[in-house]
Amino acid sequence: MNKKVYWAGIEYIYTSKSNEFGKLKGGFVYAFVNAYNVKIALNGIKKELNKIQLDPIEIEFIEPYNIDTKWETTEQTNNYLDLFDKSKKNKQVYFDDFFAYKNIE
């Protein structure tokens, strides 16, 4: 069985243990991980999010990353290829930039 680099779009909230809890509502991030299947990939991503006190509330997608994907800019394309390449070398989860939502009250 061969491993694949999966990527996922994840919406998250801050756990009560997070320093950002109450300050920020949550956010969105892309995650990359090398795994044998979707279940293992998702478990690894959730474990890493938990370590940084984030709780996923929606997995918008999780699928093998297509290295032929072209983004709006060369910089974006290269950024995601870099995350893909890093992920391919080990089982560590790599996150792109975290986009946080403000807490509106």
Image (cartoon, rainbow, N blue to C red):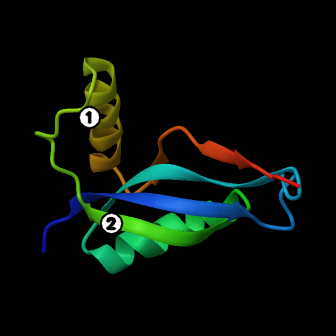
The quarter of the rendered structure image containing the C terminus is bottom right
Classify residue 57 by image quadrant: bottom right
- Looking at the image, which residue is at 34% across and 66% down? 61
Furthest residue toward top: 74
Q: What residue sits right under mark 1 in the picture?
A: 81
User: Which is more toward the observer, 69 or 72?
Assistant: 72
The quarter of the rendered structure image containing the N terminus is bottom left
Q: Amino acid at mark 1?
A: Leu
Mark seen at residue 62: 2
User: Which is more toward the observer, 8 or 93?
Assistant: 8
Reply above or below: 83 against 38. above
Furthest residue toward bottom: 39
- Looking at the image, which residue is at 37% across and 69% down? 41
Reply above or below: 73 against 15. above
Residue 4 pos. (x, y %): 20, 60
Residue 92 pos. (x, y %): 45, 54
- Looking at the image, which residue is at 51% across and 71% down? 58
Q: Secondary structure at mark 2?
A: strand
